[in-house]
Image: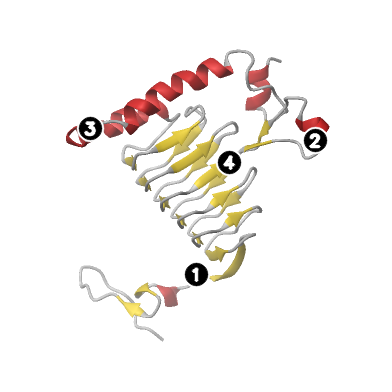
Amino acid sequence: MNQKERMRQNLPYKAWMDGLAEERQENRKRLYEYNNLPPERWHEQTALLKQILGKTGSRVHIEPPFHCDYGYNITVGEDFYANYNLVILDVGTVTLGSNVLCAPNVSMYTAGHPIHPESRNSGYEYGIDIVVGDNVWIGGNTCILPGVHIGSNTVIGAGSVVTKNIPDNVIAAGNPCRVIRMITEADRPFFYKDRQFDVDDFVFPAVP
């Protein structure tokens, strides 16, 4: 088993061997083109992004600048949107569902290093997969660490450090990130705290 195969199986590996450094360099070229695309050529962004990411829905947008290691280890669903400064260290796979929103400065780190200094100095590192479900909103300056699964329909509050799995249908926040409460039908009429929608293009239930 070579180092790339070890990386893709979430095993300790050496990042400079078996063509991995060259793959990261090629991805930097694609990212450079994407991040430096002139504003008048915005319509080319989706096609360029699909050359970077492993698999995407038909509607996907990431505001530049965007940074990742390989790109091909990232899968995003339909209607994915990320604001400025998305950073994904995709040594392990990163699977993001449909209707996922990322605020500015979201970071997802599958990559890590051993705790013991001698083990760390061996040059071995690792990547453990991250999974985010459908209909998830990740607040600004959130950091998601290796191995985390975030459930569908969940909101992660700004500034969170997500170290453990978060279930479906909750609001979670903090460092370390913890569940604050469930999301229920009582939340549907509100767009911000106690402020209700004043639009009539779809129907909201009455507030109990």
Under mark 3, the amino acid is Pro
Mark 3, other Cα within 10 Å: few <14 / some 14–19 / many ≥20: few
Mark positioned earlier in the residue sequence (4 or 3) = 3
Image quarter where the C terminus lies is: bottom left
Kind of element beneath mark 3: loop
Q: Which residue is mark 3?
A: 38
Of badges 4 and 3, nearer the viewer stands: 3
Residue 174, image x, y percentages:
59, 63
Tally the marks.
Answer: 4
Query: Seen in the image, is 31 located left or right of residue 95?
Result: left
Q: Nearer the viewer, residue 193 or 184?
A: 193
Under mark 1, the amino acid is Ile
Kind of element beneath mark 2: helix
Query: Seen in the image, is 36 located left or right of residue 2?
Result: left
Mark positioned earlier in the residue sequence (2 or 3) = 3
Under mark 2, the amino acid is Pro
Mark 1 and mark 3 in contact? Answer it, CB < 8 Å.
no
Residue 12's tag is none
Mark positioned earlier in the residue sequence (4 or 1) = 4
Under mark 4, the amino acid is Tyr
Q: Which residue is mark 4?
A: 109
Q: Which residue is mark 2?
A: 117
Q: Which residue is mark 1?
A: 183
Of badges 4 and 2, nearer the viewer stands: 2
Relative to 128, does residue 184 appear above or below in the rendering? Answer: below
Mark 2 and mark 3 in contact? Answer it, CB < 8 Å.
no
As measured in the structure, the alpha-carbon distance from the residue carrying label 4 to the one carrying label 1 is: 26 Å
